[in-house]
Image (cartoon, grey):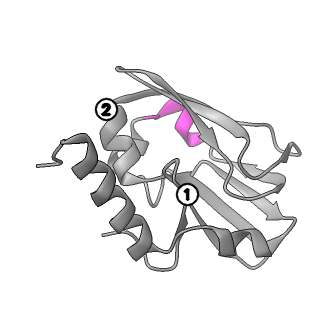
Amino acid sequence: MYPQHYRFTKEHEWVYVEGDVAVIGITDYAQRELGDVVYVELPEVGQELTAGKVLGSVESVKAVSDVYSPVSGEVVEVNTALHQAPEKINQDPHGEAWLVKVRLRDPAELDRLMTASEYEAYIAQASQASGSSSE
């Protein structure tokens, strides 16, 4: 279900790399847990992000959740379409609803992230532990 060329965090962000630019978003699992997304707060172009630190937030009808950067680098593009249509995160979290693009400072940071199969096992284990079901 999760794109094989993406990497994932335990906080439910994804990243894939195009050249020296990392594209970052939140996972399908995250958007389902959040419910209907109504607002997205994103960093400014030119802002420096640090892996593991907050890059912005996603607000749903249920809660506001911080989004953490999986990698370090400079924001080179922000998905401004999400300001007018935050619901795209619910509709296409792994595609059109990317959040930011970041020029990678240290590509080795990607090696610390989960593969798609590792992430799928992680969320299956988390769902099992909480007793919840995605059915």
Res 35 label: 2
Q: Residue at x 82, y 63 (%)?
A: 103
Q: Residue furthest left?
A: 135
Q: Position of residue 37 (x, y in %)?
A: 40, 31
Left or right of 114, for residue 35: left
x%, y% of residue 45?
Answer: 82, 44
Q: Position of residue 64 (x, y in %)?
A: 49, 23
Residue 26 visible in the displayed image? yes
> Does the rendering let one see residue 92?
no
Q: Nearer the viewer, residue 50 or 75?
A: 50
Mark 2 residue element:
loop
Q: Indicate the quadrant where residue 43 lies.
A: top right
Quarter occupied by the N terminus: bottom left
Residue flagged by tag 1: what amino acid is it?
A: Thr
Q: Mark 2 and 1 residues: CB-CB less than 8 Å, in contact?
A: no
Q: 75 or 7: which is nearer to us?
A: 7
Residue located at (10% from left, 49% from top)? 135
Q: Residues within 10 Å of mark 2 (few under 14, many from 20)?
A: some
Magenta part, dominant SS: helix
Is 61 magenta? The answer is: no
Question: What is the span of residues highlighted in magenta in the rendered image?
Answer: 81-86
The residue pinned by badge 1 equals 9
Left or right: where 101 falls relative to 73: left
Category of crowding for the residue at label 1, using alpha-carbon neighbours closer than 10 angstroms: few (below 14), some (14–19), many (at least 20): many
Give amino acid for label 2.
Gly
Q: Residue at x 39, y 36 (%)?
A: 87
The image shows residue 88 at horizontal and vertical percentages of: 41, 43
- Residue drawn at x 68%, y 49% is 69
